Image (tube, rainbow, N blue to C red):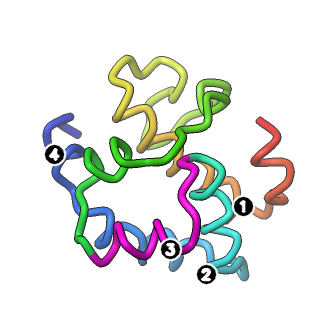
């Protein structure tokens, strides 16, 4: 996917899809939120505000209180691309989030996912 498209994708449109992906595998919105909180430093209020503001991914991550520096330890393939080989920091963050939600949907415990 072209990087500029990722920058302008609305987080508020993707967020329900992340929850649906997890819930299809009997995981919860709270688990999805825990991953987002870990990655971005947002709390419930901050996340809600970003959704209500209809922020795009660029704004969502730029306004994140504290992007967890351990996100660079996330490895694996998402959409046929190795996460650790993505050079664009924003695209890597978006793909890292997607990879973490994929692992959640595959049954991996949140604690193990966040321990990366």
Locate residue 13: give its quadrant.
bottom left
Please indicate whether residue 4 sits to the left or right of residue 40 in the image: left
Q: Residue at x 61, y 73 (%)?
A: 22
**How many numbered discs sit on the rendered protein?**
4
Q: Secondary structure at mark 4?
A: helix
Given this view, does label 1 or label 3 mark the residue nearer the observer?
Answer: 3
Whether 107 is drawn above or below 83: the answer is below
Look at mark 1 in the image and give the residue it sits on. 106
Left or right: 39 in relation to 64: right
Instruction: Please identify the quadrant where the N terminus is shown.
Output: top left
The circle on residue 30 is none
Q: Mark 1 or mark 3: which comes first in sequence?
A: 3
Q: Element under label 1?
A: loop
Where's residue 73, x and y in %? 67, 25
Residue drawn at (24%, 45%) of the image:
6
- Residue at 50% from the left image edge and 51% from the top image edge: 98
**Screen quadrant of the C terminus:** top right
Tell me the magenta residue range: 40-52
User: What is the spatial separation of the Cα atoms under label 4 and label 2, in whole angstroms?
Assistant: 27 Å
First of labels 2, 3 by sequence position: 2
> Given contact means CB atoms under 8 Å apart, are the residues at marks 1 and 2 in contact?
no
Q: CA distance from mark 1 to mark 3?
A: 28 Å
Q: Which residue is mark 4?
A: 5
Give SS at disc 2: loop
Q: Which residue is mark 2?
A: 24
Question: How far, Cα to Cα, is label 1 from label 2?
Answer: 10 Å
Residue 111 location (% of width, % of height)? 85, 54
Q: CA distance from mark 4 to mark 3?
A: 27 Å
């Amino acid at each position: 996917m072209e990087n500029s498209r990722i920058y302008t994708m609305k987080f508020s449109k993707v967020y329900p899809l992340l929850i649906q992906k997890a819930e299809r595998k009997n995981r919860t919105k709270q688990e999805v939120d825990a991953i987002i909180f870990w990655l971005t430093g947002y709390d419930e209020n901050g996340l809600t505000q970003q959704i209500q503001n209809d922020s795009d991914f660029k704004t969502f991550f730029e306004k994140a209180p504290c992007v967890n520096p351990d996100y660079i330890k996330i490895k694996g393939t998402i959409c046929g691309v190795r996460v650790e080989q993505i050079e664009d920091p924003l695209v890597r963050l978006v793909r890292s989030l997607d990879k973490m939600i994929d692992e959640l949907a595959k049954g991996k415990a949140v604690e193990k996912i966040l321990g990366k």
